[in-house]
Amino acid sequence: MQHPENDKAYKGLAVNSGVSSQPTVNPYRQLRRRRQLSVNDYVEGILKGDVSVLGRAVTLVESTAEAHQSVAQEVIEKCLPHSGHSRRIGITGVPGAGKSTSIDVFGLHVLRQGHKLAVLAIDPSSERTHGSILGDKTRMEKLSVQPDAFIRPSPSAGSLGGVARKTRETIVLCEAAGYDRIFVETVGVGQSETAVHSMVDFFLLIQLAGTGDELQGIKRGIMEMADGIAINKCDGDNVDRAKLAAAQFRNALHLFPPTPSKWRPEVVTYSGYYEYDIDKVWDMIDRYFEYVERTGYFERKRQEQEKYWMIETINEQLRSKFYNTPEVAALLEQKELRVLNNEQSSFTAAKDVLDFYFERLRAEAGRCD
Ligand code: GDP
C-alpha cells in the first residue's frame, strides 16, 4: 500500500507493511477429550493423593446424573476404609464476620504444622446467586496457591439435605486422599449449621464485637452448637470492644445447658486480618480434641453422625423418589385443589396420595416377580 509517509522526502515515522492478521482461534489447539476414568482409576488416583483425580471425583459426587452417581457411590464405598483420620472443623459466622480472611490464615497455620488441608463449604443459597459464594478460591488468596490445600466451593444444586450430603461424601474422598484437616464453612444465618454440625468434630463460631447487640443475627441454636467462639477483628480501636464482647459471650454461655461432651465452650479474641492470636484460637481447638479423644466422645460423636447420615440419606432418597414420580405429582396437584376448596381434609388427602404411591410400588414389585 502507498503511504505518503514512505516517500523518501518524508521525514516523519515510516509505516511498515506489517503482517496479515492472525486467526483468532489457534489452529494447533486440539480438542482434548478427557479419558473416562474407571472406578479403580478414581480410587487409585485418590489414594495416591492425585489432586486432579480427586477434583474429578468430587465433580462426580456433585453431579445429579444417575450414571455419575453410581460411579461416585462405588468410589466412595472403596475410599471409606481409608477415611476418618482427620480433624473436621466447622466454621460459621454471619457474612462479613471474616470467615474467608480467617480461613486463609487458619489454613496457613495448620499447613505450617505439616498437615494437608481441605476447605469445603455448604451454601445451599448458592443456586440462587448463580455460582457458589463460599469456598471460592479467590477469597482465600494465600491458601489457594498452597499445594497442600484443596479448596472446593459449595455444591450448588439442590436442597440443603442434598448439598450437605455431597459435602459429607467429599470429606470421605479428601480424607482418603490424605487430607488430615478438613474445614467446612457455612454462612451463620440459616439451617445449614445443623447440617455442618452433623459432619464435623469441632464447631467454631466467628463473631464480631461492637455492633450493639452482641448476639447479632446469630440464633441461640447456633450458639448452643458452638464448641468455641472466636471474636474476630480484635485490632486497632476495636480491641476493648472485642474483649468486652468476649466477656459477654462467656456469661451468656454459662446460662446454656452443658454440652453432650461436657466440654465447656471457650471464647477467644483474635484478628484474622492482622494475624494476631491465631495460635490462641488453635490452642483452644487442640485442647478440645485432646479432651474428646481422652473421654471417648470423639468416637461416640462420629458414630452418631454415621447413623444420622444413614437416616438422612434414606429420607432424601425416599422423598426424591416419591416426588419425582409423575403420577404422584399429578395426583398431588389435584389433591391440593381439593384441600384448598375445602372438599377434603389435608390428612385424608395425604393418605390418598401415599396409598396411591405404595399401591404403585406393590404393583411394580408384582410385575418384577
Ligand atoms: P466473610 O464474609 O465472613 O467471609 O468475611 P471476609 O473474610 O470477607 O471479611 C469481611 C471484611 O472484614 C473484609 O473487608 C475484611 O478485610 C475484613 N476483616 C476480616 N478480618 C478482619 C480482621 O481481623 N480485622 C479487621 N479490621 N478487618 C477484618
Image (spheres, grey):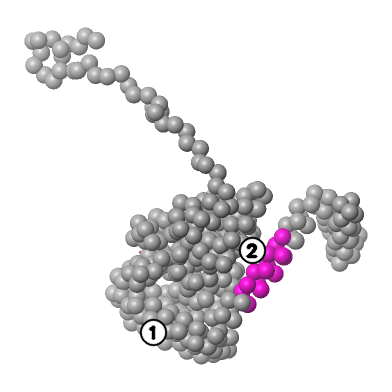
Q: Which residues are magenta?
A: 304-317
State the image coordinates of residue 153 (x, y, percent, origin top left): 49, 57
Helix, strand or loop at mark 1: helix
Instruction: Name the one closer to the observer, 267 or 172.
Output: 172
Left or right, 93 with respect to 192, comes to: left
Q: Amino acid at mark 1?
A: Leu
Residue 8 lies in quadrant: top left
Helix, strand or loop at mark 2: helix
Point out which mark residue 161 bears: 2
Q: Residue at x 53, y 88 (%)?
A: 295
The label nearer to you, 2 versus 1, is: 2
State the image coordinates of residue 152 (x, y, percent, origin top left): 48, 57
Crowding at dot 1, Cα within 10 Å, few <14 / some 14-19 / many 20+, comes out as some
State the image coordinates of residue 225 (x, y, percent, origin top left): 55, 79
Q: Residue at x 53, y 66 (%)?
A: 82
Q: Residue at x 58, y 65 (%)?
A: 80
